Image (tube, rainbow, N blue to C red):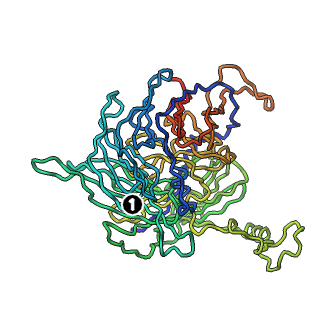
């Protein structure tokens, strides 16, 4: 089955076109400092780990882990190999993080050791690696019930080369308990002769218990699948039931091995496109859109089923499913939109744009059955505007209004990337992509766990805003749902040149960024103001204000971990764990 192109569908009800800006608030943020008994060891990159991908994967690793099943609970691994847990109930009575497990008295000293990684697989299971090549699966019990139960090791196996754990899930099918774990490696690649000499590897491991009769069930590796690519993924997660995988990356990934056997690499199939003629044609100007829809010959006016709202369009024939239906790319004026039957076999529809000027890249979101027809005037105008870029002359007049393009002045950063950033869904059975989203200019910002029963959400930049998307693998027609918006955050974060981590509260009440050292920025969603405020430029009353707050930590140590809950921010350095009370109950 070939992969199909998919467009992310923005929920316009979650956008705020009237958002103005964040107002700096000087309100103090209560900050609590816990001094750690032992340092959190930041694993420095070796001389051999010199590539950008090494820095992205290990140099920017988040050493702090949020427990999505239990509120205000975080975990980390210290230099002694201890897994430490802190659950906050009362900020003014913070205790020391308590040890729940110890990897070993002396962590691995192998030369290629990476940072210790932890993934909370379920409410009662966790996956752990000390930075070497050993995968450990532990039964934790109910971590948030206030008990001091130590974690129990039930599976430990050497997986070959060192790795970090990206994601893990737990599920039960037909009485068999299975855990899916996703491992990340950066490996020397003899075939990579033109680039850095390294490639990125994702290994998807399935560990399940064997159905023993009259004896304790033993966990063992059931399946190992390997994907390879050339860039560290921004996002990688397994579906809750282990039936698929989602990866967002700058370069594509492909499955190369299953249980040590090479996967046959077939030629990439083209995206699924119907080999039939377009069912509609359309043109546009700055003010309106005109489309022609093929209809049954001899169509009467009474048989036409036409409905248009500000954001949706439906065209069809009585007694049949709509020929064209869906969300328009931008809003129109329904009252000014008209239709007429042409030559008894086509329908001509004119839609009046609500906002003049912007040109639409598509008519109906995600619909590829139409064809855009450019008018002669538009083609001539575009040709005129681009003439200065197609000159064969060298740049003889650099001071001219429109100097010709000089290829000798171009640098590597001016080139278009070989592969544009994409978000891909892989099917577990076929090991092939089923849905591909071209992210283009939608910059990846961060990943956040909103609902532990669902896949992690990813936040992407759309224009100036930051939009949160929830994967829905059980809905192939609407696999990524827009569930929240942080106004202007895409624009704001681009100005933070020293930004290291970004995150948001699971209830979307605020988003936060931190720099490498000290400073933390908090951006709250608009909320009603308690006093009467007026916009002096526009002479209107302001009902809501979005606040920005800045906190400065009392530490000169680099920030190693950064996580957010609905009420608190947790910030980890090598010597301290800071708790910032952002929201009240």
Front residue of 156 and 322: 156
Q: Position of residue 105 (x, y in %)?
A: 36, 44
Query: Quarter of the image holding residue 163?
Result: bottom left
Q: Nearer the viewer, residue 350 or 410?
A: 410
Q: Residue at x 74, y 70 (%)?
A: 410
Please name the residue shown 44% across and 60% down the image: 185
Q: Quadrant of residue 33?
A: top right
For the N terminus, give its image quadrant.
bottom left
Nearer to us in this view, 96 or 404: 96
Seen in the image, is 492 located left or right of residue 233?
Answer: right
Where residue 47 sits, quadrant-wise, is bottom right
Q: Is residue 314 visible?
A: no
Residue appearing at x 47%, y 56% in the figure: 322
Residue 147 vertical placement versus 249 (above, below): above
Query: Is the residue 185 above or below the residue 450 in the image?
Result: below
Spot occupied by residue 494 in the image (x, y as percentages of width and height): 67, 48
Q: Relative to residue 394, is residue 133 drawn left or right?
A: left
Asked whether the viewer can see residue 567, the reply is yes
Most foreground residue, 83 or 309: 83
Total count of labels: 1
Which percent across, then down, holds residue 231? 52, 62
Mark 1 element type: strand
Q: Which residue is mark 1?
A: 203
Within 10 Å of disc 1 (Cα), the crowding (few <14, some 14-19, many 20+) is many
């Amino acid at each position: 089955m070939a992969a199909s192109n998919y467009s992310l569908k923005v929920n316009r009800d979650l956008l705020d076109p009237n958002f103005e800006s964040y107002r700096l608030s000087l309100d103090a943020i209560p900050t609590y400092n816990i001094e750690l008994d032992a340092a959190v060891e930041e694993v420095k990159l070796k001389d051999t780990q010199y590539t950008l991908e090494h820095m992205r994967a290990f140099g920017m690793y988040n050493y702090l882990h949020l427990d999505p099943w239990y509120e205000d609970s975080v975990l980390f691994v210290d230099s002694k190999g201890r897994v430490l847990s802190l659950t906050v109930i009362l900020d003014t009575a913070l205790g020391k993080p308590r040890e729940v497990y110890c990897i070993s008295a002396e962590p691995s000293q192998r030369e290629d050791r990476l940072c210790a990684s932890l993934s909370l697989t379920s409410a009662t299971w966790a996956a752990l690696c000390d930075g070497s090549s050993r995968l450990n699966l532990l039964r934790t019990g109910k971590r948030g019930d206030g008990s001091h139960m130590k974690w129990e090791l039930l599976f430990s196996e050497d997986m070959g080369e060192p790795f970090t754990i990206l994601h893990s899930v737990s599920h039960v099918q037909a009485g068999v308990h299975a855990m899916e774990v996703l491992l990340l490696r950066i490996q020397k690649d003899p075939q990579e002769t033109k680039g850095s000499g390294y490639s990125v590897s994702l290994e998807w491991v399935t560990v399940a218990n064997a159905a023993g009769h009259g004896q304790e069930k033993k966990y063992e590796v059931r399946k190992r699948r390997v994907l390879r690519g050339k860039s560290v993924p921004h996002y990688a997660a397994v579906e809750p039931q282990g039936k698929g995988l989602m990866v967002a990356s700058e370069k594509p990934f492909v499955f190369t091995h299953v249980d040590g056997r090479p996967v046959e690499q077939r030629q990439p199939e083209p995206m699924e496109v119907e080999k039939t003629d377009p069912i509609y044609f359309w043109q546009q100007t700055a003010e309106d859109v005109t489309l022609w829809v093929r209809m049954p010959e001899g169509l009467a006016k009474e048989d036409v089923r036409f409905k248009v709202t500000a954001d949706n369009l439906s065209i069809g024939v009585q007694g049949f499913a709509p020929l064209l239906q869906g969300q328009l790319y931008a809003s129109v004026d329904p009252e000014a939109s008209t239709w007429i039957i042409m030559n008894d076999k086509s329908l001509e529809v004119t839609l009046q744009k609500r906002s003049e000027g912007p040109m639409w890249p598509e008519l109906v979101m995600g619909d590829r059955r139409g064809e855009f027809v450019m008018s002669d005037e538009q083609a001539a105008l575009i040709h005129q505007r681009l003439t200065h870029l197609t000159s064969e002359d060298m740049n003889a007049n650099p001071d001219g209004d429109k100097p010709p393009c000089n290829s000798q002045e171009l640098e590597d950063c001016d080139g278009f990337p070989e592969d544009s950033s994409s978000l891909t869904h892989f099917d577990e059975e076929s090991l092939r992509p089923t849905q591909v989203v071209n992210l283009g200019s939608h910059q990846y910002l961060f990943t956040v766990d909103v609902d532990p029963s669902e896949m992690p959400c990813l936040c992407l930049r759309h224009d100036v805003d930051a939009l949160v998307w929830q994967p829905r693998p059980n809905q192939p027609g609407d696999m990524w749902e827009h569930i929240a918006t942080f106004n202007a955050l895409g624009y704001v974060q681009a100005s933070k040149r020293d930004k290291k981590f970004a995150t948001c509260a699971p209830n979307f009440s605020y988003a936060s960024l931190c720099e490498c050292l000290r400073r933390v920025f908090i951006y709250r969603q608009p909320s009603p103001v308690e006093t009467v405020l007026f916009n002096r430029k526009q002479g209107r009353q302001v009902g809501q204000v979005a606040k920005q707050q800045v906190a400065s930590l009392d530490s000169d140590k680099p920030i190693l971990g950064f996580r957010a809950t609905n009420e608190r921010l947790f910030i980890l350095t090598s010597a301290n764990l800071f708790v910032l009370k952002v929201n009240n109950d």
